[in-house]
Image: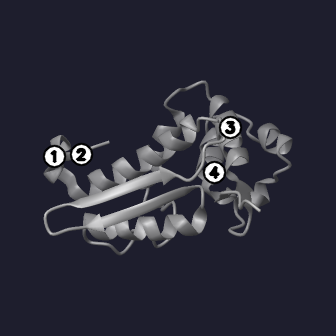
């Protein structure tokens, strides 16, 4: 039997909150997936990755802004709130932040594998989707990229050297 990759529903809460604050009605989309607003606060509610990708895409499309998800992710990283509580709140270095993010992310989703390799001269951080279901999770990836890049920039500051970043 194949174990489907799962994603914690509450990771979508910042997107739903932003949609509501900008005057959009995400509840109609949530209802299509039989999700209540209370489900967004329950850490024990998980969806299969393909369902989560479809839900995130439909929610973000409500805004008609192709940069909506990346902006939500970036603003979350600078708001003092954390995607995964305690994941980076007490870290002092980029290596620590990426390590804790990797560890906490695996608790919230099995659809992506994160790894952090720390060496004296560099840190390698990787995210790899565990499966492909034909849905390209554009907004899902944009949200994660916005969050991570903003978090990294906040930690590293002016020491950031983009010429050493490999994507």
Which residue is located at x 45 percent, y 60 percent?
114
Do labels 1 and 3 touch, CB within 8 Å?
Answer: no
- Residue 75 in the image, given as x and y percentages of width and height: 44, 47
Per the rendering, the mark at residue 165 is: 2
* Label 1 sits on residue: 161
Density class for disc 3 (Cα within 10 Å; few <14, some 14-19, many ≥20) is: many
1 and 2 marks in contact (CB < 8 Å): yes
Q: Is residue 115 rendered to the left or right of residue 81? A: left
Mark 4 touching mark 3, by CB under 8 A? Answer: yes
Disc 2/disc 4 C-alpha distance (Å): 28 Å
Residue 34 visible, this orientation: yes
Up-down relation of residue 7 to residue 146 (above or below)? below
Q: Which residue is nearer to you in this view: 144 or 2?
A: 2
The kind of secondary structure element at disc 4 is helix
Q: Residues within 10 Å of mark 4 (few under 14, many from 20)?
A: some
Query: x, y percentage for residue 105?
Result: 51, 64
Viewer-nearest of labels 4 and 1?
1
Residue 74 at least partly seen = no
Name the quarter where the N terminus is drawn.
bottom right
**Secondary element at image label 1:** loop
* Colour mapping used in the image: one colour
Of the numbered discs 3 and 2, the one sitting upstream in the chain is: 3
> Which corner quadrant of the image does residue 134 belong to?
top right
Alpha-carbon distance for marks 1 and 2? 7 Å
Secondary structure beneath dot 3 equals helix
Q: Nearer the viewer, residue 54 or 64?
A: 54
Rounded to the nearest whole Å, what is the CA distance between mark 3 and mark 2?
Answer: 31 Å
* Marked residue nearer the N-terminal end (2 or 4): 4
Kindly identify which residue carries mark 4: 12
Pair 3/2: label in front: 2
Residue at 20 percent of width and 42 percent of height: 162
Instruction: Name the residue that disc number 3 marks.
Output: 59
């Amino acid at each position: 039997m194949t174990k489907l990759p799962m994603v914690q529903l509450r990771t979508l809460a910042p997107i739903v909150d932003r949609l509501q604050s900008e005057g959009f009605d995400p509840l109609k989309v949530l209802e299509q997936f039989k999700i209540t607003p209370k489900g967004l606060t329950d850490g024990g509610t998980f969806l299969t990755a393909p369902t989560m990708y479809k839900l995130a895409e439909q929610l973000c499309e409500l805004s008609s802004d192709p940069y909506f998800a990346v902006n939500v992710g970036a603003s979350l990283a600078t708001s003092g709130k954390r995607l995964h509580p305690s994941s980076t709140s007490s870290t002092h270095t980029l290596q620590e932040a990426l390590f804790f993010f990797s560890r906490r992310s695996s608790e919230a989703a099995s659809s992506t594998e994160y790894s952090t390799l720390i060496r004296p001269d560099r840190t390698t951080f990787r995210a790899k989707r565990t499966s492909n279901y034909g849905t390209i999770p554009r907004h899902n990836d944009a949200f994660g990229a916005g969050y991570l890049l903003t978090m990294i920039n906040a930690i590293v500051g002016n020491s950031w050297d983009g010429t050493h970043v490999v994507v």
